[in-house]
Image (cartoon, grey):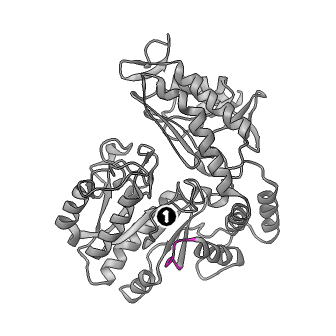
């Protein structure tokens, strides 16, 4: 059997069904901003491998960091042991993160870091003699991961986890932030949030949200004033604020962390994805010394979490190199140039009747359709155009690597415009013209 047949026989891909015949493309290699398929075709990468490969692929600096670390150790347990890559990375993260975040707890994926952050908030409230504070408030249209507690704070209606409603903890949801990025936040925009806090604050451990950009829940960009108001209300009601910066951290929105747009610092912050430049799975939870000390003073006197591959030395070494590579580069200018290129390149889509909105922020470009795409029919169209773009729902979006040059970005945007122009709205789906039923 060839690779695709072997894959179809035994491999279950994310968000897919076995035997469904969904298009899958074998990759032979990747370098710079290009993915090379096994048939020799090269695709300009518009996804940064789910938003993580900010430096592109096969980067010599990151390759070198991995090789050097392999000579010492690939892994060692973090219980009772420590090592220089982890300590150095913790120090680097503290140095660049919003003020007050002084403690780092490592995890092995974004979803797990959200789980750890939520457990941290619950243990903090228990240690404060507030055991009834075990729920979380979050705006609708959010996305925080695929594990159980992370699912519980994803959007309960439009999210992909509604099938697990019977087993998930029940959280408190408020209206999504209404004012768009750059707009002021009026009192009416806070009405849902303020009403829910007034009613539920005595049972809430924390507010959790994605700062400025609601990612996989809809790619919505919202007002920095709203985020600042959430910080103020958390302080007023004695709640922790958890900022999920897994998608937005490390420059994606034009600031190193999206919280900086509002000039606020959370009590707990999760980071992942771009942390290692897409090389290894690694995430981290940053928090204040007050949160850590309070948990330490409570029963049982320690934080009840510890992943097996926590602070993997190989991942930490690559992360150190990735963070240094980012900070030593003109990343702000690069992201600003990408934003300008996305605005110009995607603007023709705004004239199409089946397009609801086109929006850009930092190195994020979004074309929102009026109906969801049919992935089985649309995904191959992008490959035919020589780009790797993976839409979801009604969203065709781009999050290119920061090192993408102007010509490649223009080609990437032109491919999106070409495919979107060929789509038509058909019985609730956007499908290629003449394709017939999307089912």
Q: Tell me if 369 is positioned left or right of 275 in this view.
A: left
Quadrant where the N terminus is found in the figure: top right
Q: Is residue 155 above or below residue 92?
A: above
Q: Is residue 317 above or below residue 147?
A: below
Q: Is residue 8 magenta?
A: no
Quadrant where the C terminus is found in the figure: top left
Residue visible at 39% across and 28% down? 370
Q: Position of residue 404 (x, y in %)?
A: 71, 44
Q: Quadrant of residue 30?
A: top right
Pick the front one: 273 or 296: 273
Q: Position of residue 393 (x, y in %)?
A: 43, 34
Q: Secondary structure at mark 1?
A: helix
Q: Tell me if 281 is positioned left or right of 431 in this view.
A: right
Residue visible at 22% across and 69% down? 201
Q: Is residue 98 above or below residue 330?
A: below
Q: Quadrant of residue 188?
A: bottom left
Residue range corresponding to the magenta coloring: 97-102
Q: Position of residue 164 (x, y in %)?
A: 33, 47
Q: Tell me if 207 is positioned left or right of 396 in this view.
A: left
Q: Position of residue 328 (x, y in %)?
A: 74, 64
Circle 1 packing at 10 Å, graded few (<14), some (14-19), many (20+), is: many
Question: Do we see residue 9 in this rendering?
Answer: no
Question: Do we see residue 16 in this rendering?
Answer: yes
Judging by the rendered image, the residue that carries numbered circle 1 is 113
**Dominant secondary structure of the residues highlighted in magenta in the image:** loop
Residue visible at 28% across and 56% down? 186
Q: Is residue 342 above or below residue 64?
A: above
Which residue in the rendered view is the most extreme toward the left? 199
Q: Tell me if 107 is positioned left or right of 150 in this view.
A: right
The number of numbered discs placed on residues in the rendered structure image is 1
Residue visible at 78% across and 49% down? 58
């Amino acid at each position: 059997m060839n690779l695709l047949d072997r894959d179809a026989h035994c491999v279950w891909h994310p968000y897919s069904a076995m035997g469904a015949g969904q298009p899958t493309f074998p990759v032979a290699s990747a370098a710079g901003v290009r993915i090379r398929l096994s048939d020799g075709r090269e695709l300009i990468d518009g996804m940064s491998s789910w938003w993580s490969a900010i430096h592109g692929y096969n980067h010599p600096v990151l390759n070198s960091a991995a090789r050097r670390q392999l000579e010492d150790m690939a892994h060692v347990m973090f219980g009772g042991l420590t090592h220089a890559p982890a300590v150095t990375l913790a120090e680097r993260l503290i140095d660049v993160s919003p003020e007050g975040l002084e403690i780092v707890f490592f995890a092995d994926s974004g979803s797990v870091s959200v789980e750890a952050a939520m457990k941290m908030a619950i243990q903090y409230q228990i240690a404060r003699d507030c055991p009834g504070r075990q729920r979380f408030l979050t705006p609708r249209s959010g996305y925080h991961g695929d594990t159980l507690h992370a699912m519980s704070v994803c959007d309960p209606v439009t999210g992909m986890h509604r099938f697990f409603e019977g087993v998930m903890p029940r959280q408190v949801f408020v209206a999504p932030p209404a004012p768009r990025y750059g707009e002021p936040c009026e009192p009416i925009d806070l009405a849902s949030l303020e009403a829910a806090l007034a009613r539920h604050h005595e049972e809430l451990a924390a507010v959790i949200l994605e700062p400025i950009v609601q990612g996989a829940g809809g790619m919505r960009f919202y007002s920095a004033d709203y985020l600042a108001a959430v910080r103020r209300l958390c302080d007023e009601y004695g709640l922790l604020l958890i900022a999920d910066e897994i998608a937005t951290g490390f420059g994606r929105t034009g600031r190193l962390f999206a919280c900086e747009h509002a000039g606020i610092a959370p009590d707990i912050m999760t980071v992942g994805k771009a942390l290692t430049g897409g090389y290894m799975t690694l995430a981290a939870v940053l928090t204040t010394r007050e949160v850590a000390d309070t948990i330490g003073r409570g029963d049982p006197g320690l934080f009840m979490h510890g992943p097996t591959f926590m602070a993997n030395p190989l991942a930490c070494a690559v992360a150190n190199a990735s963070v240094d590579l980012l900070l030593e580069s003109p990343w702000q200018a690069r992201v600003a140039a990408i934003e300008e290129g996305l605005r110009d390149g995607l603007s023709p889509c705004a004239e199409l009747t089946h397009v609801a909105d086109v929006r850009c922020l930092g190195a994020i470009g979004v074309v929102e359709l009026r109906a969801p795409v049919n992935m089985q029919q649309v995904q191959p169209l992008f490959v035919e155009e020589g780009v790797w773009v993976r839409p979801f729902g009604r969203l065709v979006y781009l999050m290119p690597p920061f090192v993408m040059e102007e010509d490649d970005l223009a080609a990437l945007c032109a491919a999106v415009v070409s495919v979107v122009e060929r789509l038509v709205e058909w019985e609730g789906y956007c499908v290629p013209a003449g394709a017939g039923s999307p089912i």
